[in-house]
Amino acid sequence: MGRYLLRRFVFLLVSLALASVVLFVLLRLLPGDPANALTSVGASPEQIAAARHSIGSDRPLPEQFTHWLGQLASGDLGTSFVSSLPVGPEVAARLNVTVPLTLAAFVLAVVIAVPVGFVAAYKRHTWYGALLSGISQLGIAVPVFWLGMILVAVFALNAGWLPSGGFPLDGWSAPADAVRSLVLPVVTIALVMSASLIRYVRSAALDVLGSDYLRTARALGASFPRAMWRHGLRNASVPVISVLGIELASTLLGAVVVESVYALPGLGSLLATGIAQHDYPVIQGVLFVSTLAVLGIGFAADLAQRIIDPRLRGRLSGGAR
Amino acid sequence: MTYTDVLRKPAEARRRRSATLLAGCTLTALIALLAVVSLVWLPYDADDTSGGRLAGPGDGHLLGTDKLGRDLFTQLMTGSRIAVEAGLGSVTIAALIGVTLGVLAAFAQGWLDDTLAAFLDILIAFPTLLLAMLVVAARSATLGSAVLAIGLAQSAVVARLVRILVKRVLAQDYVTAARTSGTSWPRTVVGHVLPNIWPTLVVNLALQFGLAVLAEAGLSYLGLGAPPPNASWGRMLQEAQATFTTAPAGALAPGILLVVLVVGVNLVADGLRDTLDPATRRRRS
């Protein structure tokens, strides 16, 4: 396990290095000049050149890249072209909204999906088993922003129980308001996420329920709950964990639509503004931090799978996919 | 279980499966019909605002009008055309790029294989919508940009699936047999590999179609899809958001059609999987 950890960690670093090169090159390939965002319409060529010089986009690409790497090494994500504010603190402020939002939605989705998915598999021949599968089938087809609109209309506009959007300006120093403003977004993301999770849990549970080892355990006298607990849960959780990792990672940035419905100042909306304004340091900063998170989550998921399933331990990556 | 039960069971399961396929085809055909009809006939002109703002259903407007006085049903029909175009376009791009990359990646060995697998994983974790924003920022907000972006994002998913499927086929004896009898690699891929991954691939592409429709709606909701007056369902929903409680028809109808189309293609995918793939055929019945 120790040797595996080391190899997997080196692999993580190499991926991160590769990803940062790809990130940098791809962004520079995009047409559109960030200097345009800084100057007014009809600016003279001299003004545009000055703007380019001030942000360093007139220097050769390798030089820009090493400059960026140097900054990264000292923990500096650079300075926004547009607002002239450092990117690091801005990203950190957005993470204060996005991380609680994503984690709470994720936990709620798992809490919903695991029991529902299991019941849908175990009771698949009954009417409510079929109903649960049907509801998850429907849930996958519902656009997340539409669900958000409906929840706002019902619980905020009609009932007036919760705010329809926004986040308190003083953030978490007003904890009650902050929590209240996150309730609907969390529920929105969790419901959509759990709809697809239910399907994975259901199919993992179906595999386990039809397995020989479960039948053997039962034949040896283990009660059904005990056989499921000792043998079923372990085996079913391996494929589910790899899906969970991907879901968690993509929700981190993918929450952008929900952030837009609820006017939340999250990481996704920061990236959206950055892209609209060709603000490279902001785009780079957000994408770098999220790549780090994606790789970290993948690492954790792989590790968890190996702790659960010793059969995987000889392999470097990919888990049980 | 008696002998006749054993005989009857597969037949019953088959009937249930074809019911899934039938239901899916019906729902999908409903939207496809709206889309096709919208090409030749629309109840009102796209920018005809003569209906009065936010009129209720009736009075010459089947579902009423939006906040600019445009007929809702007309917009819904145009929207179904855009949704179908978005789905077909994205899936075509995803299939072309994804299958090519996936087949090539399946031949990689050792560290290159690990790296490719990890790279595809990272690409997949990168949300479709944000890739789409990058593409839209680089080009402009059109249906074409949205379709290109969604197709590119989905090609990573298709590539990963194809890589795994092809690897599995390449390990089969019939591939070894074909190779030892002198068949070239390209011929082996076309003659043996592709036909064997085809059923699973088609099912996945059908699922991707639904996801592409949802992604296009999300982009349009953010104002990054087809520009006005092309009424995409996503943009209709965004425009109707402010008047949800006063004029609910505009905020509900596009969402319902979206769900109908996506549930439809997902059911088609489920039905196809059960009819095409013998491995799941046994387990699911």
Image (tube, coloured by chain):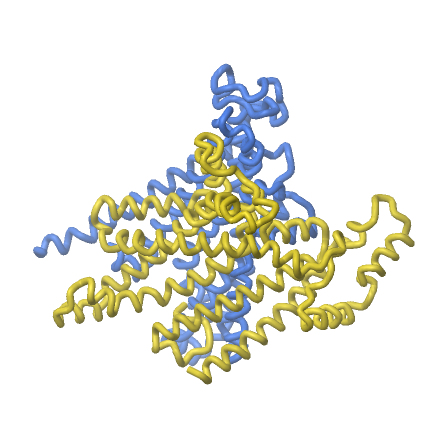
Chain colours: A yellow, B blue
Say whether residue A193 is left or right of residue A258: left
Q: Is residue B42 visible?
A: yes
Q: Give percent across and percent down for residue A321.
A: 41, 68
Which residue is farthest front? Answer: A173
Residue closest to the eye, B155 or A209: A209
Q: Give percent across and percent down for residue B77.
A: 52, 31
- Give the quadrant of residue A138: top left
- Looking at the image, which residue is at 45% across and 52% down? A105
Q: Give percent across and percent down for residue B247.
A: 50, 25
Which residue is farthest left? Answer: B2
- Looking at the image, which residue is at 43% across and 49% down? A190
Residue closest to the eye, B7 or A284: A284
Image height check: is B98 above or below A163? Answer: below
Which residue is farthest bottom? Answer: A3
Q: Is residue B253 visible?
A: no
Residue closest to the eye, A103 or B27: A103
- Quadrant where the N terminus of chain B sits is bottom left
Image height check: is B1 above or below A5? Answer: above
- Looking at the image, which residue is at 34% across and 44% down? A135
Say whether residue A116 is left or right of residue A289: left
Q: Give percent across and percent down for residue A161.
A: 45, 36
In this figure, what is the number of numbered marks? 0
Image height check: is B96 above or below A8? Answer: above
- Looking at the image, which residue is at 40% across and 53% down? A109
- Quadrant where the C terminus of chain B sits is bottom left
